[in-house]
Amino acid sequence: MANKQQHFDLLLYKEEILNGNSSYLSRAITLGESTLDSHRQQIQELLLELMPHTGASIRVGVSGIPGAGKSTLIERLGTYLIEEFHLKVAVLAIDPSSELNHGSILGDKTRMELLSRLDQAFIRPSPSQSNLGGVTRNTREAIFLCEAAGYDVILIETVGVGQSETAVQSMVDFFMMLQIVGGGDDLQAIKRGIYEHIDLLVVHKADQDQANQARKEAASFKKMFSLFPPKESQWNPRAMHCSSQENRGIDHLWETLMEYKKLTQSSGYFEQKRTHQNIAWYQELQQEQLGRFLRTHPKLTTALDHIQAEMIAKKHSPLEASKQLEKLLTDLFPKT
């Protein structure tokens, strides 16, 4: 009876998500955020049903130093795309996690109140759970769920900035970073690695009397990008300035993004990058499946608990315990 109910729920979720039901979309993302093996199995079964309906969106990563105005720019851009082009826009905002309960500290839609009122917008904050790269373990799955629900543009706002933020590259088509006017000194604190992955750098908060300075800084960034070796995509990273507060430069930003998409699709790089994204997802799933196997295999669970207990009792160091695990796996699964 339980299996029948589960099968019914699966079909219901599929139908509602394909119909663009944001409530079921939110429930599915919540299901994917669970660490329970049963829930992980359910979300993967749902994704198997939905995968033929994914892939049509443009996936955009947005990062920047704290205070750069990422949420403000995303709200302006999302509103512009909905009002001017009637596109459906999904925002996956990765919030810092509470150390106590791993909940989202910044709350739901408080930072994008205007955008959240639009029917064609979907905003989903998720705790980062201290993951490397500032993106949740399930952001990739949330992207596919949003695509199946018919969203044309998916904006992924990542936590802070730093070299670990390059992890977002494994799941987006286009990566932009925000820098505030006069923040040039902050560049020295950011490792160069992230700049090598940038497709567009936006000097943000170029408001009123700051516009001229922002223009100069954008030109300086362009010069810096020219020193980098050519990218495989053949796209030369761009730099521009804009003001979300004064609603200036948002149209230029979107034009730049569309120019990138056109160039990389015609060269085949766009599809090549999507293939690399799928490889990264497969590797993540591979690690997850192996972990589940270790936790649930009847011959392994008892032995693993015993090894850990002896380590806690200080009979073995963690390294010695790992060697015991290696021997256990070799005995169970000999190479020949």
Image (cartoon, rainbow, N blue to C red):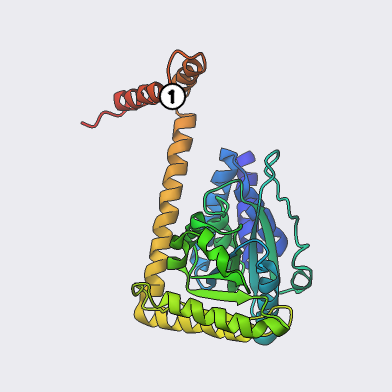
In the image, 255 versus 47, the foreground residue is 255
Specify the amino acid type for callout 1: Pro
In the image, 177 versus 182, the foreground residue is 182
Visible residue check, residue 245: yes
Look at mark 1 in the image and give the residue it sits on.
318
**Relative vertical location of residue 15 with respect to residue 2 in this rendering, above or below:** below
- Could you say where residue 142 lies in the image, as x and y percent from the top left? 58, 58
- Could you say where residue 224 lies in the image, as x and y percent from the top left? 44, 75
**Relative vertical location of residue 166 with respect to residue 202 in this rendering, above or below:** above
**Relative vertical location of residue 72 with respect to residue 43 in this rendering, above or below:** below
Left/right placement of residue 319 relative to residue 172 reads left
Visible residue check, residue 148: no
Residue at the extreme front of the image, as rendered: 185
Residue in view at x 52 percent, y 67 percent: 54
- Could you say where residue 64 lies in the image, as x and y percent from the top left? 59, 65
Residue in view at x 65 percent, y 45 percent: 5
| The quadrant where residue 15 appears | bottom right
Image quarter in which the N terminus is found = top right
- Could you say where residue 6 lies in the image, as x and y percent from the top left? 62, 46
Left/right placement of residue 307 relative to residue 104 reads left
Task: Determine crowd level at label 1: few under 14, some 14-19, many 20+ residues with C-alpha closer than 10 A.
Answer: some
Residue at the extreme left of the image, as rendered: 336
Image quarter in which the C terminus is found = top left
**Relative vertical location of residue 15 with respect to residue 181 in this rendering, above or below:** above
Left/right placement of residue 165 relative to residue 276 reads right
In the image, 301 versus 161, the foreground residue is 161
Which structural element holds mark 1?
A: helix
